[in-house]
Image (tube, helix red, strand yellow):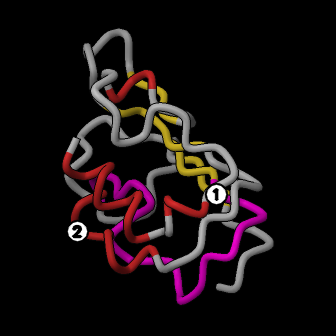
Amino acid sequence: KYILVAFYYALGGMGWFDSMNWLSDEHICFWMGIECSAMEGSLVKSITLPMNNLDGTLEKVEKELSFLKNFRELILNDNWISGHFPRGLGGVGKEGGLDSAFRINVSNNRM
């Protein structure tokens, strides 16, 4: 939960168009835009928040997001995210290259 709370604050969660259940007592798998892996219980599988007025930088939560063990997808297109895409994200495979099973969409931001 800490990782997602850090994500919320780093990307201006108070100004999001839809932040249903974020920071609530609801299980994180019921927070808007969060998908969890059914096979792995409550491990965060994806964060999908396109066109939701996210404003900030991913660098602020790069370390935290890297701790999500089953993380496969980051869809944040059409927001106000600035900076550059953190090298620590993107699903690094066994050979040290980009894991092709990791899906990323950060288009139409200020990156």
Q: Position of residue 103 (x, y in %)?
A: 59, 48
Which residue occupies the foreground of this view, 106 or 20?
20
Q: Position of residue 104 (x, y in %)?
A: 60, 55
Tag 1–tag 2 contact (CB < 8 Å): no
**Is residue 88 highlighted in magenta?**
yes
Q: Which residues are magenta?
A: 76-95
Q: Secondary structure at mark 1?
A: loop
User: Magenta region, mostly helix, strand or loop?
Assistant: loop
Which residue occupies the foreground of this view, 1 or 99?
1
Name the side, left or right, on which 39 lies relative to 72: left
The local crowd at label 1, few if under 14, some if 14 to 19, many if 20 or more residues have their Cα within 10 Å, is many
Mark 1 residue type: Leu
In the rendered image, which quarter contains the N terminus?
top left
- The residue labelled by disc 2 is 63
Q: Position of residue 16 (x, y in %)?
A: 62, 57
Residue at the image point whose x is 29% and y is 61% from the top? 6
In the rendered image, which quarter contains the C terminus?
bottom right
Earlier in the chain: of badge 1 and badge 2, it is: 2
